[in-house]
């Protein structure tokens, strides 16, 4: 074991900003201002069904101490199918309200363990779960019990890792529902975008996921844990002060060197689990199948890109230039999800966030600053015909053609200077003539931004130079 060194709090935390427009805990949620609804696949049909439920976050309200996020829990990316026998579909929360603190605090006592069910919310209002799925080993029956399919009860000693044990039931965006509650246990970037693809679900049921990993840029802020601290994607600044370049943030949990499961990492003797190398009833439960297969190796000041026991660290980020404690969605070198995945197995802070029935204090509805409009023209390779038109899209109803639309694109705005951080992202429908209009609340007139086009799994395309923004900006990607 390496002796643990605690990093001093060398930055002044600035959690509550006087201007709500720039407070990330208020301004970072993906509000649905276009009326976009959820979509889902059913097994055997690769054409998505358009639902009537509004996607992403419906409203954000705040007081002096808290922010309230109202959501149906449905993402704008396509959900399903879930091919492991899970009978659920992603189901609306009917405007559930989640309350988060604006000034989260460190828990200086005994750390609070994460639990089954919601332990945080992503910026699109979708639930975050920890590693578990409710299944564990039953040593008498010599099999896995519990979870969404099995009806027997496990011992609760060797607890199955959902990311490994339920991989066959995740959709393209690496998520699934529990009694309708659609959630991610892991990095919410589509399977198809991993460097080594470990699920073929996207081949028939394509979807985007919440964000795309980019090893050259600080990952975006993707959610908040139930202790109020922010969650980022897989990459960040190497050093806690924002220097050292961009690196992959690494889990400090490693697989134990065991072949029999009779003790925990701390030496405690427990009810045995299955062998890691000898099949049980034809199944080999290799290392990493259970949460207890891991042990934590403490970090040091010389390894700042390795995270602490909660899967986070105190550091500078683009949204928090003065520093804050952050969790990261950890992946391995192949971009496959790495335990403990996002938050856990304990919280860093005091767990105060929760789902509430109503708002019982005076609040202000968050209204972004006056929006700027980008009128874009771009032609997608593979859709382009001749002249100035593209192929129209196929609609899900009877495979009829919509003659005006081509497909949905994501258009990001990035800062014009290094590290070219993401400012804001918006989705729009690209017309067959190559035009698409998008609105942004964070882009300021008089500033310049790089315009980045993303379409499905294709390589992103950046504008040749930063584009000067006015209240209404016209830009042709051929410029």
Image (spheres, rainbow, N blue to C red):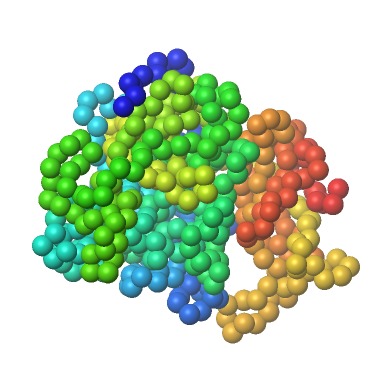
User: Does residue 367 sit above or below 81 in this rendering?
Assistant: above
Which residue is located at x 23 percent, y 64 percent?
280
Q: Is residue 240 visible?
A: yes
Q: Based on the displayed image, in which of its 4 quarters is residue 310 positioned?
A: top left
The answer to whether residue 107 is left or right of residue 239 is left
Q: Is residue 60 visible?
A: no
Q: Which residue lies most toward the right here? A: 387
User: Does residue 127 sit above or below 249 in this rendering?
Assistant: below
Which one is nearer the viewer's eye here, 93 or 204?
A: 204
Residue 437, percent from left and from top: 71, 55
Total marks shown come to 0
Which residue is located at x 30 percent, y 38 percent?
295
Residue 455, percent from left and from top: 66, 58
Q: Based on the displayed image, in which of its 4 quarters is residue 120 positioned?
A: top left
The answer to whether residue 45 is left or right of residue 150 is right
Which residue is located at x 17 percent, y 43 percent?
263
Which one is nearer the viewer's eye here, 364 or 479?
A: 479
Residue 467, percent from left and from top: 78, 40
Which one is nearer the viewer's eye here, 270 or 60?
A: 270
The answer to whether residue 412 is left or right of residue 220 is right
Which residue is located at x 59 percent, y 84 percent?
398
The answer to whether residue 13 is left or right of residue 291 is right
Which one is nearer the viewer's eye here, 199 or 422?
A: 199
Residue 471, percent from left and from top: 73, 42
Image quadrant occupied by the N terminus: top left
């Amino acid at each position: 074991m390496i002796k643990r060194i605690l990093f001093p709090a060398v930055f002044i935390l600035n959690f509550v900003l006087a201007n709500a427009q720039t407070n990330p805990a208020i301004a970072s949620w993906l509000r649905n201002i276009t009326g976009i609804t959820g979509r889902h696949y059913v097994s055997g049909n690769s054409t998505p069904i358009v639902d009537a439920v509004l996607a992403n976050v419906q409203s954000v309200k705040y007081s002096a101490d808290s922010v309230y996020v109202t959501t149906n829990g449905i993402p704008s990316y396509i959900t399903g199918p879930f091919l492991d026998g899970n009978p659920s579909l992603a189901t609306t929360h009917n405007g559930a309200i989640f309350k988060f603190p604006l000034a989260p605090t460190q828990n200086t006592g005994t750390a609070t363990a994460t639990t089954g069910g919601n332990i945080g919310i992503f910026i699109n209002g979708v639930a975050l779960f920890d590693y578990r799925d409710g299944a564990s080993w039953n040593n008498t029956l010599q099999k896995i019990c519990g979870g969404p399919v099995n009806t027997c009860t496990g011992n609760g000693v060797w607890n199955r890792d959902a990311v490994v044990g339920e991989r066959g039931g995740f959709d393209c965006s690496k998520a699934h529902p529990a009694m309708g509650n659609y959630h991610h246990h892991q990095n919410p970037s589509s399977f198809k975008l991993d460097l080594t693809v470990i699920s073929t679900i996207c081949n028939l049921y394509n979807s985007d996921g919440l964000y795309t990993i980019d090893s050259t840029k600080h990952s975006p802020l993707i959610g908040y844990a139930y202790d109020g601290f922010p969650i980022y994607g897989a990459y960040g600044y190497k050093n806690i002060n924002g220097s050292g370049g961009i690196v992959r943030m690494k889990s400090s949990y490693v697989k134990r060197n065991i072949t029999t499961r009779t003790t925990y990492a701390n030496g405690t003797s427990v009810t045995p689990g299955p062998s890691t190398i000898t099949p049980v009833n034809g199944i080999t439960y290799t290392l990493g199948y259970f949460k207890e297969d891991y042990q934590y190796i403490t970090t040091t000041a010389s390894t700042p890109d390795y995270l602490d026991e909660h899967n986070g660290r105190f550091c500078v980020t683009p949204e928090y230039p003065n520093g804050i404690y952050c969790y990261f969605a950890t992946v391995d070198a192949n971009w496959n999800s790495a335990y403990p995945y996002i938050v856990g197995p304990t919280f860093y802070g005091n767990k105060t966030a929760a789902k509430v029935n109503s708002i019982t204090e005076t609040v202000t509805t968050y209204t972004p600053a006056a929006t700027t409009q980008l009128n874009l023209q771009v032609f997608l390779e593979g859709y382009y015909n001749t002249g100035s038109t593209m192929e129209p899209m196929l609609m899900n109803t009877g495979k009829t053609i919509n003659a005006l639309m081509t497909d949905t694109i994501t258009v990001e705005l990035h800062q014009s200077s290094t590290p070219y951080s993401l400012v804001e992202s918006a989705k729009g429908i690209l017309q067959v003539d190559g035009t698409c209009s998008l609105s942004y609340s964070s882009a300021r007139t008089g500033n310049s931004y790089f315009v980045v086009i993303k379409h499905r799994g294709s390589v992103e395309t950046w504008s040749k130079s930063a584009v000067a923004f006015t209240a209404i900006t016209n830009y042709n990607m051929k410029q």
